[in-house]
Amino acid sequence: MTITLDKTSDRAITKKITLEEFLVYDDDTETLYEFEDGEIILMASESETNRRIASFLFACFLQQGVPSYRLSMKTEIITTGSRMRIPDLVIFSEELASVMKGANRSIVMPEMPAPALVVEVVSPNQSDRDYRYKRSEYAARGITEYWIVDPLLLKVTVLEWVEGFYEEKVYEGEQVITSILFPELKLTTVQVFQS
């Protein structure tokens, strides 16, 4: 399959393909793609700010006692039958970590247990995707917590999965972020953005 990129958007110009075709697609580059309803979506280059925030949170969760085998960056998650996302940070549940042990590709298939937590760091021009589309997809997948870290608006939105929907809490400034999965976490929004 040949893929060419539309320079005016993040979408690849190609005929619609199936998820199965996408999963075997390889363009011999390190480029990351998400998949959305038959279209290959070029992921925007990650900014240094986004990379630092994701790395800082990775270290924070390690300090909270999350074993390193449960933490992952750039894990692919099939959220529905026609969409695949790559969050900035994923915390596996123990059950999922057990299933992923020895996998040759870091991809969470629909029949696998859901991750416990995903973090998306908002990139410029990507807020709709993170705040709207991924929210409903991660909720449908049953992911317990979804964090949207927004360095543009300097806020962290924590979504907790309750009976099939996310309940939202927004944190700014010196507010301490609360997590149902990590009640001992003592982290403020300011600390996240100073990272």
Image (cartoon, rainbow, N blue to C red):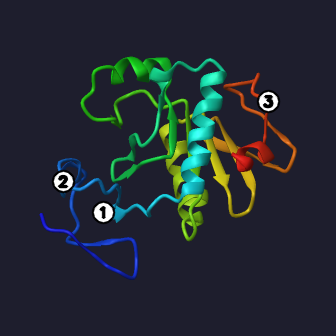
Q: Nearer the viewer, residue 124 or 107?
A: 124
Residue drawn at (23%, 48%) of the image: 23
- The crowd level at tag 2 (other Cα within 10 Å; few <14, some 14-19, many 20+) is few
2 or 1: tag closer to the N-terminus: 2
Which SS class for mark 1?
A: strand
Compared across the picture, whether 43 is left or right of 39 comes to right
Q: Nearer the viewer, residue 36 or 176?
A: 176
Compared across the picture, whether 86 is left or right of 168 comes to left
Q: Which residue is mark 3?
A: 186
Whole-percent x and y of residue 52?
59, 47
Whole-percent x and y of residue 116?
54, 29
- The crowd level at tag 3 (other Cα within 10 Å; few <14, some 14-19, many 20+) is some
Q: Amino acid at mark 1?
A: Ile
Whole-percent x and y of residue 20?
20, 48
2 or 3: tag closer to the N-terminus: 2
Q: Which residue is mark 2?
A: 25
Whole-percent x and y of residue 55?
56, 40
Residue drawn at (86%, 43%) of the image: 175
Residue drawn at (48%, 46%) of the image: 87
Compared across the picture, whether 120 is left or right of 34 comes to right
Calculate the distance from the C-alpha at mark 3 to the C-alpha at mark 1: 38 Å
Of marks 2 and 3, the one in the foreground: 3
Q: Amino acid at mark 3?
A: Lys
Q: Which residue is mark 1?
A: 40
Q: From this view, report whether residue 44 is shown above or below residue 100.
A: below
- Whether residue 135 is visible to the viewer of this picture, yes or no, is no
Of marks 3 and 1, the one in the foreground: 3
3 or 1: tag closer to the N-terminus: 1
